[in-house]
Each structure stands twice: as C-alpha cells, then as structure tokens.
Image (tube, rainbow, N blue to C red):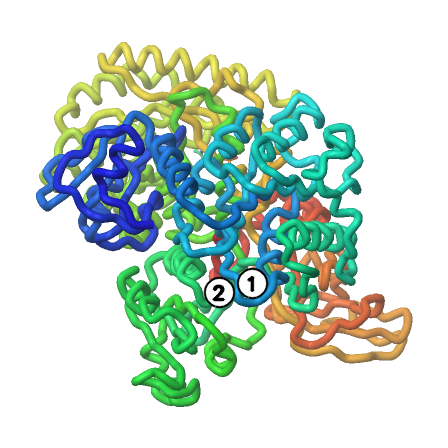
Amino acid sequence: MRYLLSEIAQIVGGELHGVDREVREVVTDSRRSVCRESLFVAMVGENHDSHRYIIDTIGRGVESYIVERIDFEGVDGDISYIVVEHSITALQHLAAHHRKGFKGTVVGITGSRGKTIVKEWIAEAAPEGLKIFRSPRSYNSQLGVALSLLMIEGDEDIALIEAGISEPNEMARLEAMIAPDIAIITSIGEEHDEGFESSKQKIYEKLILARRASKVIYNSYYTELIPHIIYGNIGYIDAVDFAPATLDDEASRINSQIVAALLHALELGTPRFDALSSASMQFNIVEGICDSVIISDGYRSDRHSLTIALDALHTTATGRPTMVILSDVEQSDPSMVTAIIRSGVDKVFVVGANSKLYKSESELLSTLTPDMIRGHAILLIGELEAVAHRLIRKSHTTTLEVNLDSMIHNLNHYRKHLSTGCRLVAMVKANSYGAGNTEVAQILQHQGVDYLAVAFADEGSTLREGGITMPIIVLNADDGSFSQMVESRLEPEIYSLRSLQTFAEAVNMQGESRYPIHIKLDTGMHRLGFMESDIEGLTEELHKQRDRVYVASIFSHLATADMGDEGRVSTESQVALFERMCRSLIEGVGYNITRHIANSAAIIHYPESHFEMCRLGIGLYGFGDEGLRPVSRLKTRIVQIREVTEQSRIGYGGAGITSTTSRIATIPIGYADGLDRHLGCGAWSVRIGGESAPIIGRICMDSCMVDITSLNGVEEGDEVVIFSEEEGNTAEDMARVLGTISYEVLTSISTRVKRIYIKE
Ligand SMILES: *Cc1c(COP(=O)(O)O)cnc(C)c1O
C-alpha cells in the first residue's frame, strides 16, 4: 500500500496532526519490525493498550501514527498522527477502501477447518504465471483481515482472504471489508459452536460472507449446508462434483475438490494437484549448534512471506542476536535485503551466483565461525540445504518445547472468568513452573498481565536483566536480598514485623521512599503471613514506616480451592477471614489497598474470591480446567535400536525381561533430566509416531530403554515424546502414575534440558 496520511485521515474520518507524509505499511504489533514508512496503529483492547508502546516505536524510527488518544508526552521529533475514535474500525475502513481499488478477483474463504490449507493449495495448484496474494496464515480476525487486505499491492490477479468467526455478528464486518467476488465455505464442524445458538445460526452467519459474491463454492459432503443452498442458481457450485486429488485422508480430498471447483469457477482449468504440498506456512524452529536457534520455513520469495518470516525470527529471538541467511537473490526482489536490514536484524548473509559476497553455500560455511553464530537466532530463507545441515544440531538431545500460543490461549481462558477491572498476577516462580524464564515473562508482559510473581529475588533480577519492566513481586523475600531487590525494583511479600522493619531500612539505605510492598496474611494455610491478632501491631508499624513503604496489595493463599466440595468449607472460611482482616488493615492504614487471594482453581470455582486481583499459576501452563492446552512437550530422539531374544534382561538389575523376540530403543533421557525413576518398568509409556511404547527396565541417570516391538517402521533418530498435550500422555497423567501433582512433574525437568519456544 501507499497512502498519504491526509488521504488516510479522510478515508477513516480522523483528524491529522503534523506534517503530511507517505506511509507504506501498517503495523499494530510493536514487536514487529518497523521502518520510517510504517504507520503504527495504537489500539485499546480488552486486556491490551498498545498506546504504551508508542514511545518505543518512535525510538525505532516510526513517524506516523493512528491513535485513540494523544499520548506523546515528552517526545520530540517529527511525529504525525491521526486521531480517531476507534482504531480497529478506522483500520477496517481503510482496508475496505483499499479493497475497492483492487482490480483483480477477491476470493473470501471461511469454514470451520481447512481455510489455511485450501488457501495454500489454491496458490500451488493454480497455473503458473498468475500473481496470487494470500492472506498470511491465521490473519483471519477482525484485525487480521484488515491487515491482510492492506497488504495487497494491486498488481495481483487474485487475492485469497481468510475470514474466521467465533461469535454471531462478526461476519458482517468482515464481509464489508472483503466484499468477495467468490466465497468459499470449506467445512462445517463443531468448532466455536459455543459462541452460536445452533449449527443453523453458525451456517447462516458464515453465508453472510457470500452475500454479494457472484459465486459460492461449498461441498455438499457437509449435509448441514444443503438446506441453505439455493438450487438451480448457477452461482452455487457444489465441489462434490469435482475430481479430488489422490490423497490419503478424507479431509484433504474434500479440500482438494474445493480447490478444483474454484479453479473451474475462475476458468483456470484443472488444478495441478501434483504440485500440492501439505506444508502451510508453519515455521520449523530447531536447536542449532553453538546454542543457536534455527528457524526455517516453506519459503516463497515474496515480500509478505518475508515479513512473516522476519516476525517469526524476532519473536523467537527473545533477546538473542539475530541473523538471516538468504539464498538465491536473483529470483527474488532485491529490496528484500533492505527490508531485512531495516527490520533490525543484526547480521545478514546473502548466498547465490549474483551475490558479491558468497557465491555458494560452501563458501559461506568456510567463513562462518562458531563465534559468529553463538547464541544467535538464525532465519534461513530459500534453499540452503548445506547450511541447514551444518547449523542444525543433530545430537539427540532432549528438549522441552514450550508453546507460547497455548499459553496465551490459557491466559485468555482465565481472563474470561474475571470481571472487568479485575487485575491479574501471573505466577512465574520456579522458572515459570519449569517452562523457562524470560521468554515466558516477555509474552505475559506483552499480553498486559499486571504483575509477575517469583519465589526468590534472584529469579526477579534475572527477569530484569532479560528486559522485563513490569512490576514483579518476590514471594520468599529473605532479608539478605533486600538491597538487591530495591536496586532491581522488585517488590517483596512482607510476612512479619521483622521483615517489614528490615525492608524499610533497606529502602532508606538505598535512598528510596514510598516503596511498594505486599502484605501476606495467614488465613488458614499456616505457611507465612500475619495472623488476625497481628493486624494491630502491623498497622502501627506501617504508620511508622509510611514514608519508606506503602502497601500496594494485601494477599493470602488458599489451601483447598482445588479440592472440589471437600475443600469448600475451608476455602469459604479462608475467604471470609481474609475479607475481615483486610477491612481492619485498610481502616488502620487509612488508604485503599488491592486485595487478592484466588489461585488458578479459585478463579474458576470461587468467583466471590476474586476481589481486585487474582493470581494465575498452574492454569497458565495448561492444567486445572477443561479446555486448557498444556504448553510443554518433553521430547527426545532414539539413539540406538537393538533386537534381542525372548527372556533378555534389559538395564540395571536386569529388571526388564522380554517375553518375545523384541526391539528395544535407547533414548537419552534419565532421572537426572527429571524423568522420575518410578516411571520405569512399564509404569510410563512414551509416544513414537503417535503410538505408545512402554519404558522397559529401570530408568538410568541419563538414559532409558523403551520397548518398540509392536511399532512398525521406527528408526534410529526418530522423535520420542515423553509427555505432551495429547490425551493419556500429559504431565498430569504422568503425575497420576507417580502419585503426585502436575506442578511437581513440570518443575522437575532439569535445567540441563534445553527449552525451545514456539510461537506462530
Ligand atoms: C504458586 C502460588 C500461586 C499459584 O497457584 P496455582 O495453584 O498454580 O494457581 C498463587 N499464590 C501463591 C502465593 C503461590 O505461591
């Protein structure tokens, strides 16, 4: 896109302040790469206000903004901004305008499943030479669709735009922007049914996308659609009449029929199904040599794929230095290198016959030293087989894969239970329940969580070093670390008069005043905290120390909120005592104070315990309620497979005995990695290619053996999943076997197991 700010102001009905200038792209995520021609659109969402990232983006060179309020305090520089009432609506108007100016055919794609794959397949199966725009993977929401449309450059023949809805009335707004010439309904399924009164209502809503389309493509395989189709109207095309690709699964065959029906509708002949790959734009993030992370994708050389790949690089990097290795520039747009450099990548290498620097991969590899790549996040673009082969770590180490998208899903799951204005503390103690430190905290900070809580001062300091600026509470603050805490702006839990006095002293010594502290009350857990009889003395002391510290919050911890009915009486009495103790303390100190007692379980089961803030722990990591997604997956690879005769004894003590001729695989994970020894001798089964294989014999310190006799086609080097989000294979299932809780399983994964983060 290419617009003057004055044009945009007119289109969106906003007021332009500052000089007029041209902008070439819209950015809404402040973590994304930006440049001088970016237009940053600040938005206020339910849990997120990106106006607070404006200063940061100005620092990175952005000069043009759409904002809902003027928030440029203390900024100098040549900033232009358009003030609007509602940023998303403004962006949608701009997108609709941009769409109207597009001369090619717009295809809108909706459906419960298959939207992305159908979109990718259309692009692959269409005749060569057509220029096709595809909305980026999963950009299908109210915001995503607007951003997608604005990425259309104008010289494309076809634009494929995905539209996703989860509630009634959403489609009308999407349709107003997309105004598709052809609408595709890929499938009708159970997804998002909770948002709709009936399947009929959902289908009706989806068909709103087709309101103005001249053709509608559907598949009567989904019989629920049939009553909604107007027969005899040539505009409706049933994909069931088209020959499917020869693929194994039914869903793929149905999707391929839809692709064929669309090409027919566009008079583009029959599809080139031989060209189909099942690869959508999924990034492959793997461990590299020298502590690097390698990101590669099914890259196609166009600017938009590049933008998304760079986003993946920057989100994966989480503080690491970044590097891009780009191949084959003669076929791609030369401005790509400029775009890569502009996005703030630290090092860029270009390989190819036309490159001045490296004519071949081996030439590049001969100059890349370990020091140059150590610790980097490296994005590989184009065909770089030799480079990938050298950089990707092939050792069979065990990794814990942490899915940050699942974590965001879980966070939103709990937020739905909170009333508006109720704030949230995310518990990231013990290395974020084993999931890792800074990366997790960064996501939570970005998601607008109000506080983080850690157990010890050191954990908090590590987060500060990793660039976490949000408030952090330290739960087990010990006297020895008080000065360090004030230095790192960490806020202590205060649970005794002695700790209150010592901390106030540390604040004073550091030359600080009115420092926030959090008062812990003991309402029945009997671990730490002031008892009811201590409140009077506490109030007095707080008065004495009021120039040095103030109470930012009062809290207590529930002992039985996750025990169902059995724990109800004691939870309710803890909540009642908490309320009473808070009242006396607040009266005593004479100012209002935020109160919090609810943990994950209480957020769901005790709405009356929410007060002004809640503390979310285990739920964030995927356990404790229906509909959550376990975020961690512990995996490794087979290092060796051997065949043994019946009655062979496996491992220490010969404790595993084969009953038939057996195939035994050795995997490099043992109790020193956190795989509890009690899981040996068949107590736990790992998954290989989706199938179960029991651990045979005792677990060793660094490895163990699994029985793969009943599995076919398993080879050395194959991936082995120890636990995952899959039913029957979760950390909670493992905890059940061990007679413990998921918390212990998660936090027992040793720090020598590398954490890898995944984010789409
Ligand atoms: C760990 C912890 C929590 C979180 O508990 P979950 O059961 O994981 O939600 C809340 N508050 C305190 C004080 C904690 O120590």
Residue 352, given in percent of the width and then of the height, sits at 40, 83
Residue type, label 1: Asp
Q: Front-most of 347 and 396?
A: 347
Query: What kind of element bears circle 2?
Result: loop
Residue 728, given in percent of the width and then of the height, sits at 72, 48
Which residue is drawn at the image coordinates 35% and 78% (left, top)?
350
Q: In the rendered image, which quarter is residue 76 located in?
A: top left
Horizontally, is 347 left or right of 602 in the view?
A: left
Which residue is drawn at the image coordinates 58% and 37% (left, top)?
213
Q: Which mark is residue 752?
A: 2
Q: Which mark is residue 673?
A: 1
Q: Residues within 10 Å of mark 2 (few under 14, many from 20)?
A: few
1 or 2: tag closer to the N-terminus: 1
On screen, 539 above or below 757? above
Query: What kind of element bears circle 1?
Result: helix
Q: Front-most of 127 and 108?
A: 127
Q: Which mark is residue 719?
A: none
Q: Are marks 1 and 2 in contact (CB under 8 Å)?
A: yes
Which residue is drawn at the image coordinates 53% and 66% (left, top)?
129
On screen, 547 above or below 755? above
Which residue is drawn at the image coordinates 69% and 56% (left, top)?
678
Horizontally, is 14 left or right of 202 in the view?
A: left
Residue type, label 2: Arg
